[in-house]
Amino acid sequence: GAWGMGMHHPDKALGVAALSGWWDRESYADANILFDLDTQLSFLEPSLRAVLESCIVDHDSSHMGQNLKGLPVVVRTGQEDQGVPPWHSRRMGRLLREHGVQVTYT
């Protein structure tokens, strides 16, 4: 969504307006529960597991917060949102502020 587009292509954005957004695809409902629930992974060679996990890290917007420095960011979330818990937006806003990004909550 807005996080991914803004952080991967900040040179093409005038700002980012994230309205109840997940910060990474793997946390989005049950998008990829492989690393959470697959008990066989405990037997996987650690170096292979690292390769598999590194393939999905680019979906985690929290690692690219510094890319939005210099762009205005608006974060909006519903306090009682059942689809996307508000703490996702609050966490992302906090991480962006740590990177010096101008964040406004509405």
Image: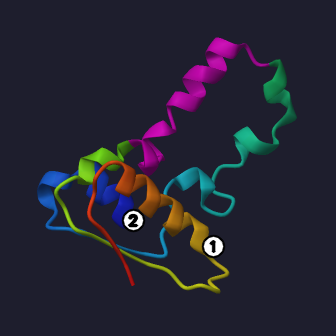
* Residue range highlighted in magenta: 44-63
Q: Main secondary structure of the magenta part?
A: helix
Could you say where residue 8 lies in the image, as x and y percent from the top left? 28, 49
The residue positioned 35% from the left and 49% from the top of the image is 65
For residue 85, which numbered disc appears in the image?
A: 1
Amino acid type for the residue under numbered disc 2: Gly
In magenta stretch: residue 95: no
Q: Residues within 10 Å of mark 2 (few under 14, many from 20)?
A: few
Which residue is rendered at x = 45% and y = 59% of the image? 94
The residue that appears at 36% across and 57% down in the rendered structure is 97
Please give the residue where the numbered disc 2 appears in the rendered image.
1
* Of the image marks 2 and 1, the number of the one nearer the N terminus: 2
User: Residue 52's quadrant in the figure?
Assistant: top right
Q: Residues within 10 Å of mark 1 (few under 14, many from 20)?
A: some
Q: Residue 29's image quarter?
A: bottom right
Disc 2 to disc 1, C-alpha distance? 16 Å
Q: Is residue 40 left or right of residue 71?
A: right
User: Residue 18 placed where, x, y %?
Assistant: 38, 72
Q: Which mark is residue 64?
A: none
Q: Quadrant of the C terminus?
A: bottom left
Of 74 and 56, which appears nearest the observer? 74
- Front residue of 39 and 78: 78
Q: In the figure, 31 relative to 56: above or below?
A: below
Location of the N terminus (image quadrant): bottom left
Name the element at disc 1: loop
Image location (x, y in percent) of residue 19: 42, 78
